[in-house]
């Protein structure tokens, strides 16, 4: 028997979410770079890029992802958000016509010495994320140095990334925005970019010339405690499986590894063919909802590699019934919260043995 675990990817929902993003960036006339790193947040990078062909560009994390896109016919600008790490990468960047995020001096030195073709760069400025990027006081000299390289196309785009845009109560985004605007004010003609999904939706003054939405395109809210439906976003991935057994246990029986759940009555328990081997989070707690025939039922006991167990009292559940783990009818944000994580990680964590279907 083939395993029932499947991820259904709704490409029209993806296109709908792109239109939602556009409707927000429209007023500000920002161009839209769809962020499709990590295999399109686990949805399949090529299918996602094709469905999002109306985006003005794509952002990825690795050269391999960018090459995969070019080889499948993607012609839009592709930005390597973190650029490259070694001189030998530059030949690939030239060959596949990729744009480069530049965040350290080593990268500048490599371009100075090794660039043999014209290259478009995005200068990354650290305004408070304190991860990658040039400190504010390094920006002027770095910009001058890049501008002096014949092979570097003009104008150089200036970018920064927010640490707390997902928290509407935090004033840190405003501080980062102000810092960015101060630093970049002397480069009036340079295109500028700040906003991720949360910036795009909640911080309209940060749209600038390019917005860089990721998670919202996949139909999840970027906000702490937020709901996709607050923004008319539709879920793109629905993770499904089926019931492979129903067992009737007695009051006092314990379920699964570590005996973490004990039946409080005689009760039927459904065994479902999904586990952390498929990317269902092992940290999902008892009580995490699972959808069977349109009804939410609680996970009980520990998540195993290949199976989970759910309480099917008060249901008509039977072997073979379809089960939704997240997606249509059951927001991934909710499951993520029960597992102490975020929907981004759920999507990226779906493993290779899950069959993907695109509609
Ligand atoms: C991942 C990423 C984004 C997209 O962030 P979301 O929260 O998914 O919208 C934007 N910009 C950069 C630099 C990123 O790394």
Image (cartoon, rainbow, N blue to C red):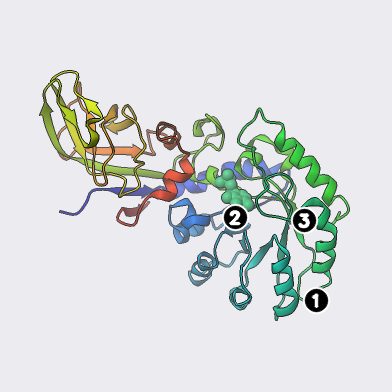
Secondary structure of residue under mark 3: loop
Which residue is the site of mark 1? 150
303 left or right of 91 in image:
left
Q: Residue furthest top?
A: 265
**Visible in this render: residue 13?**
no
Residue 157 horizontal/vertical position (percent): 75, 59
What residue is drawn where x is 43% and y is 57%?
44
The mark found on residue 55 in the picture is: 2
Q: Total of numbered circles in the picture? A: 3
Which residue is the site of mark 3? 191
What residue is drawn where x is 83% and y is 51%?
184
Of labels 3 and 1, earlier in sequence is: 1
Question: Looking at the image, which is closer to me, 135 or 28?
Answer: 135
What residue is drawn where x is 46% and y is 38%?
341
Label 3 to label 2: alpha-carbon separation = 17 Å
Ligand 1 within 8 Å of the CB at mark 2: no
Q: Residues within 10 Å of mark 3 (few under 14, many from 20)?
A: some
Label 3 to label 1: alpha-carbon separation = 19 Å
Of labels 1 and 2, earlier in sequence is: 2
Residue 7 horizontal/vertical position (percent): 34, 48
> Closer to the observer: label 3 or label 2?
3
Q: Is residue 157 above or below residue 151?
A: above
């Amino acid at each position: 028997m083939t395993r029932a675990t499947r991820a259904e990817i709704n490409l029209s929902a993806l296109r709908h979410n792109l239109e939602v993003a556009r409707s927000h960036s429209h007023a500000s006339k920002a161009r839209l770079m769809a962020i499709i790193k990590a295999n399109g947040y686990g949805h399949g990078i090529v299918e996602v890029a094709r469905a999002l062909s109306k985006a003005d560009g794509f952002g990825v994390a690795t050269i391999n992802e960018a090459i995969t896109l070019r080889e499948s016919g993607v012609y839009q600008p592709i930005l390597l958000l973190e650029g490259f790490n070694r001189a030998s990468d530059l030949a690939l960047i030239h060959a596949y016509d990729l744009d480069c995020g530049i965040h350290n001096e080593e990268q500048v030195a490599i371009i100075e010495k090794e660039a043999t073709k014209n290259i478009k760069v995005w200068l990354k400025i650290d305004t408070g994320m304190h991860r990658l990027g040039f400190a504010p006081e390094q920006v002027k000299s770095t910009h001058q140095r890049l501008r002096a390289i014949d092979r570097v196309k003009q104008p150089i785009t200036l970018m920064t990334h927010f640490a707390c845009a997902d928290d509407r109560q935090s004033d840190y985004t405003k501080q980062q925005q102000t810092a960015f605007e101060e630093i970049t004010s002397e480069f009036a003609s340079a295109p500028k970019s700040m906003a991720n999904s949360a910036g795009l939706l909640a911080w309209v003054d940060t749209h600038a010339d390019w917005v860089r939405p990721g998670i919202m395109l996949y139909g999840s809210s970027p906000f702490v405690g937020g709901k996709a439906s607050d923004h008319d976003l539709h879920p793109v991935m629905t993770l499904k499986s089926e019931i492979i057994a129903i067992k009737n246990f007695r009051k006092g029986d314990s379920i699964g590894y570590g005996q973490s759940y004990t039946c409080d009555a005689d009760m039927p328990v459904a065994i479902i063919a999904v586990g952390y081997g498929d990317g269902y989070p092992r940290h999902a707690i008892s009580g995490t909802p699972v959808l069977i025939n349109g009804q939410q039922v609680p996970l009980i006991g520990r998540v195993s590699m290949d199976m989970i167990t759910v309480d099917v009292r008060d249901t008509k559940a039977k072997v073979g019934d379809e089960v939704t783990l997240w997606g249509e009818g059951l927001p991934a944000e909710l499951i993520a919260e029960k597992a102490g994580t975020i929907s981004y990680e759920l999507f990226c964590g779906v493993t290779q043995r899950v069959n993907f279907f695109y509609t």
